[in-house]
Image (tube, coloured by chain):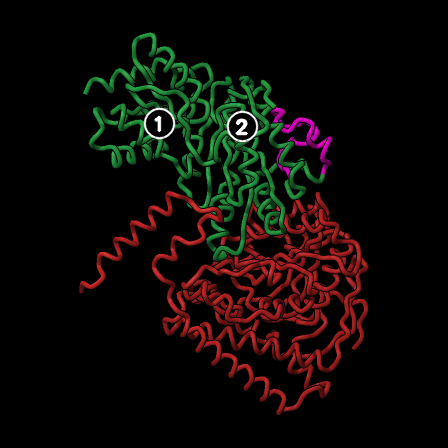
Amino acid sequence: MANGEREVGVDAPAGGFVQLLTPDGERVDSVTTADGTTYSVSFTDDEYRELYKDLVTVRRLDAEATALQRQGELGIWASLLGQEAAQVGSGRALRPQDMAFPTYREHGVLYTRGIDPIMPFGLFRGVDQGGWDPNEFKFNTYTIVIGAQTLHATGYAMGITMDGKTGNADGEAVIAYFGDGATSQGDVNEAFVWSGVFHAPIVFFCQNNQYAISEPLERQTRVPLYQRANGFGFPGVRVDGNDVLATYAVTRKAMDQARHGQGPTLIEAYTYRMGAHTTSDDPSRYRIASEVEAWQARDPILRVRALLVREQLADDEFFADVDETAAKQAVELRERVLSMPDPAPLTIFDNVYPEGSPHLDEQREQYAAYLASFEGSH
Amino acid sequence: MSETVTLGKALNLGLRRALEADDKVIIMGEDVGKLGGVFRITDGLQKDFGEERVIDTPLAESGIIGTAVGLAIRGYRPVCEIQFDGFVYPAYDQIVSQVAKMHYRSGGKVRIPIVIRIPFGGGIGAVEHHSESPEAYFAHTPGLKVVACASPDDAYWMIQQAITSDDPVIFFEPKRRYWEKGQINRDEASGALHASRVLRSGGDVTLVTYGPMVRTCLDAATAAEEDGRSLEVVDLRSISPLDLGPVYESVRRTGRCVVVHEAPSTISVSAEVAARVTEHCFYSLESPVLRVTGFDTPYPASRVEEEYLPDLDRVLDAVDRTFGF
């Protein structure tokens, strides 16, 4: 199965992409791209099984979240369906000291960081706005404004350089997540400029899921997205975003280059958003069923399952156990989401300013008095 | 230690002291390094503190503020220079949606101790986009603190206080006053960052102002004295939050209040001051709160900017009108 020369994977877009696992579950030992970079993975049997488990789990938890939204328990949900390999592969490629800047869809990356999957549900349920400490989890808060986080990631990466934390295997690096639509934003292009100029230890991980809500890729670009990197002075590479092995290999290499002080990389993970943009969206208005069916044949989970079967790394019992465990986690997650309390009214005044504001204190007191005036009445 | 310096030099000295006090303080912006800024406010700082702490950035305002946010998450305290008031708008999203809201969004777990310096206001004969007063846009945004310095001593201390503060601070500098001299006391700050200050006592009318109009109002008070009118002048210093206690105290004595700024009047700082003074001093007022401001036009061509800018005569005209009710 070795094919050291192949860059064009099965079902690749024109120009090819790095693929280490075909949709049929056939492994490719290594791939060397036109610039001479060779990608491969060397996982233990256990690690292959763990990757499968990750993929199934994040999909199952995601499905539970969609169900919770449909039942009125979440205000909205941004599903990762179809993008599990891009997120698990890139997320597992990070080292503990690395920092991730997500959009609002990176639930799979969050999971691979070892973070409690309940964490973003406060945001989608509307009981908070995603209030966690980025430095504690090495995972920034979800950013909803498209592309804004790429600049934050770049600044953070500049800080790593200023702290002298690059140049060896223990160096730190940053990964910035964004989508195909975001590549049209000024902020993303400014992030590319800054990162190039300051040689920042950052990897731009673009999940090209083919749609920005309803608008297809053709409305964002005339050239393949990974080629944009050329104009900013750093390498770009396209990877099969439905291939967890390839996304892992490509991300691992780019992150290691960044931590060694070799500057940024743009990764375009070529994938597909199988579901709606969010639970508020109706994709049947702008894309045809046959397109979705074609991508179903490239499912990121089925190909790993096929690999495990083909190489006799797992049996039916294993697969059943994975499904059962994931379902159990989903039930637990559901129960915890349902038990999230609504915040108390006066908490809306909390945390506007680290150092407070006398004016805001006054407003809070007035509103507290107003609320208190109803006590005892019906 | 007391010395006489220009307002611009006072800012420079304040920034220098902030860089010395905390090695997490960094300066970033367009031309702030080798050139020392187009107004020379950062003159000599890159030479003394290095290119990693005084950073000449690419020419993109959103990039300056967005990367500063990331540096703040990393533990730095960036002081960003926006070259001119009218160039802050490309960074508006980062300021309003990220800088202002990250602390709130994160439930208080993230702090963004950024200072954004903006030279503001007109009177320097500039082309379009170089003379604006955009403070109300930022004061309207919860999560931001907004201040304006008016004297060298305040410039020296307020910039340091803004940098030390864990709140994001939009720091307005009255660019046409950069070259005006005054005494600075380098030993002790004369007030808190968000405290307003009575600069001149008077019993007939209260003038409320900030930034470049402080000088105008003080001159108006001097001129009024010759006509036998005693004007009290309050420098707000902080636009968000407003410290209106001293204003209320003053208006309760004078019964008359005129608010002065360069920005247009509609939905402005003066509108907020007028509303609050009316609410808090209703039974003391002898006249409605009047306002002297720029007009509700875009900032005009420089050959007619003196028509647009409030001046001593327009201030005194409003003072006269408060006696007509």
Circle on res. B155: 2
Viewer-proximal residue among A372 and A196: A372
Give the spatial CA distance, label 2 vs label 1.
Answer: 29 Å
The residue most toward the top is: B226
Q: Quadrant of the N terminus of chain A?
A: bottom right
Q: Colour of chain B?
A: green
Q: Residues within 10 Å of mark 1 (few under 14, many from 20)?
A: few
Viewer-proximal residue among B125 and B205: B205
Q: Quadrant of residue B324?
A: top left
- Residue A148 seen by the camera: yes
> Is residue B41 positioned above or below A168 on the image?
above
Marked residue chain, label 2: B
Circle on res. B296: 1
Viewer-proximal residue among B74 and B122: B74
- Residue B150 rendering spot, x and y as whole percentages: 48, 25
Colour red, chain: A
Magenta residues (range): B26-51
Marked residue chain, label 1: B
- Residue A264 rendering spot, x and y as whole percentages: 71, 52
